[in-house]
Image (cartoon, rainbow, N blue to C red):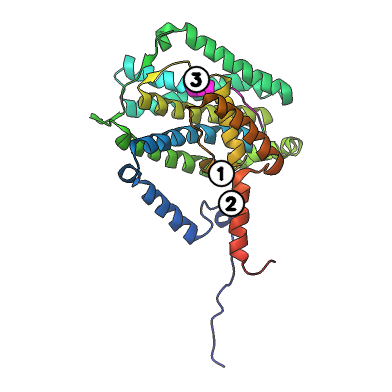
Amino acid sequence: MANSTLLPAGDFRSSYAVDTTIFPTTTSRNFAILGIALICLAPVIFSDYWLSILIQIGIYGIAALGLNILVGFTGQISIGHAAFFLLGAFTSAYISNKTSIPVFFAIPLAGVVTAIVGLIFGLPAARLKGLYLVIATLAAQYILIDFFSRAEWFTGGSVPAMAEPFSIFGYVLRGDRQYFYVVLAYVVVSYLLVTNLMRSRDGRALVAVRDHYLSAEIMGINLTKYRTLSFGLAAFFAGIAGALYAHYQLVVSNEGFGIERSILFLAMVIIGGTGSIMGIDKALALNNNLTFLREIAIGVIIIAFLVFEPDGLAHRWRQIKAYWKLYPFSH
């Protein structure tokens, strides 16, 4: 009998690095690249209205991605996320207006400043749990909103603060069709950063804090450190999203960023799936026109998902993929 080479069959993992890869298969990676390429055609295909919706989905998706680090991966809770979003917007507008720093660098700087403030609020919150943690994050929301209304040198007070249009190396990007690519770039980079963070030692420590904090502490994980870190990371992405929002709207105001906006971010995490990065991109975008119906819808959707689909759309998507992977065999 002629010698034959046995080829490996099936889908298996031979190392930890392979098991934690971003794309489990070459096909999934190629589909992701194809999806991004198709999304790049959106400014050519969609109308101005739908392009504006896509930009807002991208901006809010970045903020929800940060909140998911806190809620989904670390098991903490925050209903003050909108305040950090607004802090990032005001900070980026202030930096670009009062200094010679271009908007291209003002946006990440706003994220860093917001992260520092998030770490400050995270220090006492990291030692709290349950209802006390909810109250602490609610207090952070009101403290920052009150600061924004009083610090006229920073926010303009009752007058909305003006923000410069996005510019890079002297070239100004105006209009939705150009700004869409800015938001898309930040969405892709944010997704890659969070995905790689969760594959790192610190990311695994955050998940360990969520799953069983007593076991994590016995293993030498500093609970206070990682709980505080999760607040800082969540605030960083909220600040980035807020800065993008400021330079998209070109004006920043306190209005519309109360507790209801924080609940909206939390709803995006619950709908997409807590502890899932891909699920955030599948969360629904709600129209801002029918405000009272939107608030009712958010409440109903949150309750429905908590009862019938607690793991969010990401869990349903994984089930669909598993079904077709094993089809036609039920086992």
* Label number found at residue 279: 1
Asked whether, in this view, residue 327 is left or right of residue 103, the answer is right
Asked whether, in this view, residue 148 is left or right of residue 276, the answer is left
Spatial CA span between label 2 and label 3: 32 Å
Which residue is at 68% across, 23% downward? 133
Is residue 118 shown to the viewer in this render? yes
Q: Quadrant of residue 307?
A: top right
Q: Are marks 2 and 1 in contact (CB under 8 Å)?
A: yes
Looking at the rendering, the stretch of residues picked out in magenta corresponds to: 76-86
- The x, y position of residue 218, in whole percent, is 75, 37
Q: Helix, strand, or loop for circle 3?
A: loop
Which residue is at 66% across, 69% downward? 329
Residue indicated by mark 2: 317
Asked whether, in this view, residue 252 is left or right of residue 16, the answer is left
Residue indicated by mark 3: 256
Magenta run includes residue 57: no
- Look at the image and tell me in which quarter the N terminus lies: bottom right
Q: Helix, strand, or loop for circle 2?
A: helix
